[in-house]
Amino acid sequence: MELETLKEVWKEAANKKEIIVSGREEVSEVPDVRSRGLVSRMRRNLFYELIIVLGAVAAIAAFYFISFGGALKEVSWAYILLAVSFVVYYYKKNKLLKDMECTACRVKSNLRLQLLTLEKYVRLYLIAGTAMAPVVMLFFYILFYYKHIVLFPAVHARDGEMGFTLLYLLFTSTFTIIFYFLNRWYVNRLYGRHIQKLKSLLQEMEE
């Protein structure tokens, strides 16, 4: 009799344990599904970016190859080089996001490292994107200088070469500052806010 009672107690305890474990798994599934949704959005945004960048570069390259009698074909090659760099960046970042979507690989420590790597990619994208503005402006200045192309004849006639250079530097500085804030908003819109949500979900899963 006592043995039968003990068996019943063990059975009830085992059932309660299964319910608790099952409940924990269901709760942990919620942040996991939400995190995969955030990663999917970033992958989709990255793919749209790739299409837009390649389309814009193709149009710009074709324009400078055809226009001005091919005198500014260096601009086309420079943009093609930028496009190749972006494709490499796209491949590495997309691979990282794809790994983050892998359900079988979702170990918390691994996900934390992947998230840190993703933050580095986004930070690099922001810095490189902002730095591209003054670099492109400098490239055009050197190109026009060696090609002996005068952009604004009236300014050259009035202020001379030095005056035009100072005006160009002022415009480049102003443009870079404005572009930085626009680029920061853009990067945060596509990736930054999703990364912050992922960090919150990761903390929630750990708790």
Image (cartoon, grey):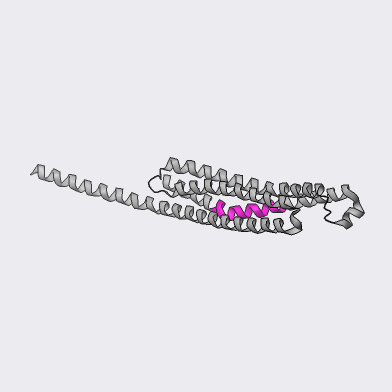
Taking the magenta stretch, the answer to whether it contains residue 131 is no
The x and y percentages for residue 94 are 51, 49
From this viewpoint, which residue is outermost toward the left? 1
Q: Left or right? Give the position of 200 relative to 156.
A: left
- Quarter of the image for the N terminus: give it: top left
Most distant residue in the front direction: 69
Q: How many marks?
A: 0
User: Residue 32: x percent and y percent?
Assistant: 41, 51
- Membership of 189 in magenta stretch: yes
Q: Residue at x 74, y 53 (%)?
A: 72
Along the line of sight, which residue is nearer the eye, 149 or 186? 149
Write down the quadrant of residue 55 in the picture. bottom right
> Looking at this view, is 168 or 143 the one in front?
143
Q: Position of residue 35 (x, y in %)?
A: 45, 52
Q: Is residue 192 left or right of residue 59?
A: left
Horizontal side, residue 194 vs residue 146: left or right: left
Q: Residue furthest right?
A: 158
Q: Which residues are magenta?
A: 178-193
* Residue 135 in picture, x, y percent from top left: 72, 46
**In the picture, which quadrant includes the C terminus?**
top left
Q: Is residue 97 visible?
A: yes
Q: Residue at x 85, y 51 (%)?
A: 164
- Residue under the image location 37 percent in, 46 percent down: 104
Evaluate whether residue 207 shows in this view. no
Main SS, magenta residues: helix
